[in-house]
Amino acid sequence: MLRRLSVGLLASALVLAPLPTKAQEGTAEDLGDVMGISLKDVVKPTIEFQGALQGAGTPNQAGIGGFLPLSVNENSVWFVDALVNANFGDRSSFSSIGDTLVSGTTLSTSTRLGYRWLNGDRSWMYGINGGYDSRQMATGDTTNGLPIIDPQTVLFQQVEINAEAKSNRWGVSSYGLIPIGEYGYGSDNVATINSFYGASPLTTVGADIDYNILPGLSMSGGYYYQYSEKELDEFKSYPDGSGFKARLTYDLNDQLQAGVVYTYDENFESRVSADFKVRFGSDTKSLSKTIGFPVLQGLSDNPRNRNIRVGNSCGSIFPEGCSGDLDGDFEQQRGQGAPGQGDGTGGDAA
């Protein structure tokens, strides 16, 4: 399955990539300049500090990462990129995963191994990368007034594969996020996170198209489809379906980048997030060689889509799911002696 997905993603990038070539600008002198640049002078190890606000299934986070070229050849690069983030609690009464607040401080990791290469005249860069991500997640209260028992901390895992193509003006990227691991409730990939809810990492497949508006300013638009594991067939409320996202990115200087992301899908509805990245390592001389050539800068870009996206699944106790008669279900559970459960009122799932 993974092999078929990787081939499909790469093929989609290669097919879409040549379409916007007429929009590129450049002169014969520019072509001569780019052909005379040695990749060993511009592809350097870097360290970056990054942070982001919570989004659709993703947490508030900040951390450190690094890009390391393993082999730099005349027109190609092998690289590894790794990062570790501290994840923080959700904003008060606003869940990043659905109906349960993410709480506390936990860790997540992401590692990518990739290969990128240039075409004959260096007008396009192509690449493929893949790797492993982990995310520890602690949970707290629900956002809909349901009293809970025993909030859990769980560890989610996924593998990712990405195919990309980039010119000096356009870019296209397709990706797949595939959960792995067993969490021991109902379905292998669903974890019980409290007395009312389960949660699962979302299988996500998507594609983005980028456009460089001005030097240092770019925008992108994309489509994704997300799929969650079902705990049991009769449970309700799953974060499945299509979504759309838009992103605006601005390089404030050679080291500092900021971005704003908007997403919409039926489960998470409208979400707005912001992020930043500060990079160190490339010297001024190497950076100056890539000015005007985003295709060369793309050789050492950090891969995207590093987060494990998580969504609530209803009904970890109640067979009617969280959209049923919660007050009645809760009273029934109290009558059966559910340990530690006090009086409370329910509400419809958000």
Image: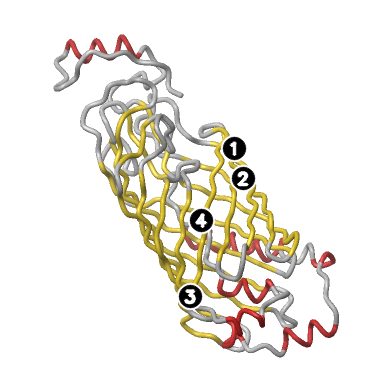
The residue carrying mark 3 is 46
The residue carrying mark 4 is 305
Mark 1 or 3 closer to N-term? Answer: 3
Left or right, 75 with reference to 65: right
Q: Are marks 4 and 2 in contact (CB under 8 Å)?
A: no
Marks 2/3: CA–CA distance? 28 Å
142 or 286: nearer the viewer: 286
Q: Are marks 1 and 3 in contact (CB under 8 Å)?
A: no
Mark 2 or 3 closer to N-term? Answer: 3
121 or 24: nearer the viewer: 24
Mark 2 crowd level (few <14, some 14–19, many ≥20, 10 Å Cα): some
Depth check, mark 4 against mark 3: the one in front is: 3
Q: Which x, y percent locates residue 331?
A: 25, 10
Mark 4 crowd level (few <14, some 14–19, many ≥20, 10 Å Cα): some
Q: Which x, y percent locates residue 98?
A: 43, 32
Secondary element at image label 2: strand
Marks 2/1: CA–CA distance? 6 Å
Mark 2 or 1 closer to N-term? Answer: 2
Secondary element at image label 4: loop
